[in-house]
Amino acid sequence: MVRVPGEVVAELGRALGVGNGVVEGFVVWLLNAYLVRYPSVGLVRLVIDVLRSGDARVVRFRRALGINSSIDVVVNINDPLFARLLTAVRITIKALVKVGVIEYVEELGVVNLVGISN
């Protein structure tokens, strides 16, 4: 199980304007459920999967960002709710890159779990 320091969770909570428990739940899901299954994924694909996930931790994260129903979100960068979710996921990814648990190739928009070979 991949763990992230509490300071990172607190920093993310402040940056995203959501509770630390919500952030921690999302990060645990991302690192230990999603990226273990899909160790290399495009950022937009990840955001779409976050939008469609029924996992309680992800639903709490979306709701904390003001996305009460994924039905209301159009998968389009011009949709304000989709853009908000994309921004929140990108901020989360960049924080996890700083602690070395994932890699993000921004030019390609690809997120890789560190230590997992494809």
Image (cartoon, grey):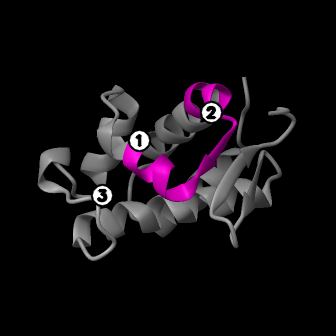
Residue that label 1 marks: 49
Disc number placed over residue 38 in the picture, else none: 2
The amino acid pointed to by label 2 is Tyr
Q: If you read the primary sequence from the N terminus, does the residue marked by circle 2 or circle 1 appear first?
A: 2
Q: Secondary structure at mark 3?
A: loop
Kind of residue at disc 3: Leu
In x, y percent, where is residue 113?
Answer: 75, 41
Q: Is residue 82 above or below residue 112?
A: below
Which label number is shown at residue 65? 3
Identity of the residue furthest to the bottom in this view:
78
Q: Can you see residue 97? A: yes
Mark 1, Cα crowd under 10 Å, few <14 / some 14-19 / many 20+, is few
State whether residue 69 appears in this view: no
Quadrant of the rendered structure where residue 78 is? bottom left
Q: Quadrant of the N terminus?
A: top right
Secondary structure mainly formed by the magenta segment: helix
Q: Element at badge 1?
A: helix
Q: Amino acid at mark 1?
A: Asp
Q: Are marks 2 and 1 in contact (CB under 8 Å)?
A: yes
- Badge 2 crowding class, 10 Å Cα cut-off, few under 14, some 14 to 19, many 20 or more, is some
Q: What residue span does the magenta drawing correspond to? A: 33-49
Q: Is residue 8 magenta?
A: no
The local crowd at label 3, few if under 14, some if 14 to 19, many if 20 or more residues have their Cα within 10 Å, is some
Q: Nearer the viewer, residue 45 or 15?
A: 45
